[in-house]
Image (cartoon, grey):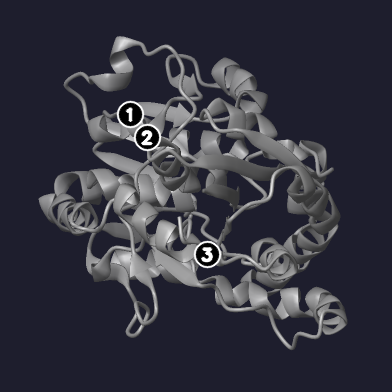
Amino acid sequence: MRILFIPGNSPSPIFSHASLAHAARSCGHEVIVGGIEWVLPDIAAIGLPAVKIADVTEADAAEFMGSAPPDPAEQAAAVGRIYSQIALQSQEPLLRMAERWRPDLIVGGSMFYAAPLLAHRLGVPAVRLEWDRVDAAMYAPGAREVLAPALAERGLDALPDPALWIDICPPGLREPGQDRGRRPMRWLPVNPQRTLEPWMYGKGDRPRVYITAGARLFGGEPLSHMARAVADLGVEVVIGAPERVAADLRAELPGIDIGWVPLDVLAPTCDLILHHGGGVTDMTALHFGVPQLIVNQDISGDAMGRLADYGAAMMLEPGRHGAADIAKACGRMLGDPRFRERAGTLAAEMAALPSPVEVVGLLEGLAGG
């Protein structure tokens, strides 16, 4: 069976889809992952075959993020529009690829635009695989603006429903009715790797706080702010950052380990993960049962709020992101074992879900392979 994955337009969905893609390859199936120009190195870095579907570069992504509206609803609509534009741009390259390598099945990310369009043209099943816990319905208003004319040309009123919808949210964080029509899958972390140093897989006597603002970060100020906020708490700080911002941060924050660290290795050694509400960071923390402090969340606010309500995280309110606010919240979380206990309950729930290998069996049933 040939499976084409089209996860999304940033590194995070690439990493999140990787466990199912690898599982399919391990079961003997052929896999190709489609991505915009920016993410092709990330696909290759996790050992998957990559094909370019659109000429969208890292600079293009940075420009879009820099101009995104601050209001969460407007920002979500803008993301829906740009993802839909890329989905339409990608159709011809994908069709040309299919002339040489025709997929039996197409797996798309939560902004489910490119995959069902292509699957409809090719007459093959499409699968929707969530890559984080954020409700992608918020992107729909912007997406409809762009997709409506193209769908009408194809005789469609809306995007075709997926033949299979796979959800990775732990049961304790699902909204009522969220699992209706969906099949669960155990989410597993996959990261680009590097040669490990001993401190990455073992820690000293101090509590370890990992700070990140995600793979789409193009400036170091948020990380510097968070690191300085916890400097007087007597903790060990590790900062995860793309190299494009890490060099300046090392000069600014001597004595702190800064750079790309495989989070699947580091997370089990962490006592707290301080971040922006990023999907893969959140899912990795959940997988390992690590409490989270969420700062500067935007469109992920609802999903992170459910985690805080569950008791496995704290989420600072807008306007309460100052150094004193961050330090107070970190101190509280590190001193209260109930956060770790609740996070551990969610990790156990995730571990009980069907593995990616089991889900490959569902894919085989769809494609008759």
Q: How far is mark 3 from mark 1, CA to CA? A: 32 Å
Query: Label 1 neighbourhood size at 10 Å, few (<14), some (14-19), many (20+)?
Result: some
Q: Which of the two residues, 113 or 287, is positioned nearer the viewer here? A: 113
Q: Which of marks 3 and 1 is nearer the N terminus?
A: 3
Q: Which of 190 and 316 is in front in this view?
A: 190
> Badge 2 is on which residue?
210
Q: Which one is in front, 270 or 89?
A: 89
Q: Of marks 2 and 3, which one's residue comes earlier in the chain?
A: 3
Amino acid carrying label 1: it is Leu
Q: Which residue is drawn at 35% across and 11% down?
A: 197
**Tag 3–tag 1 contact (CB < 8 Å):** no
Ranked by sequence position, the earlier of labels 1 and 2 is 2
In percent of width and height, residue 179 lies at: 34, 77
> Relative to residue 81, is residue 366 drawn left or right?
left
Q: Mark 3 points at which residue?
A: 127
How far separated are the C-alphas under marks 1 and 2?
Answer: 9 Å
Q: Which secondary structure, mark 1?
A: helix
Marks 1 and 2 close (CB-CB < 8 Å): yes
Mark carried by residue 266: 1
Packing grade of label 3 (10 A; few <14, some 14-19, many >=20) is many
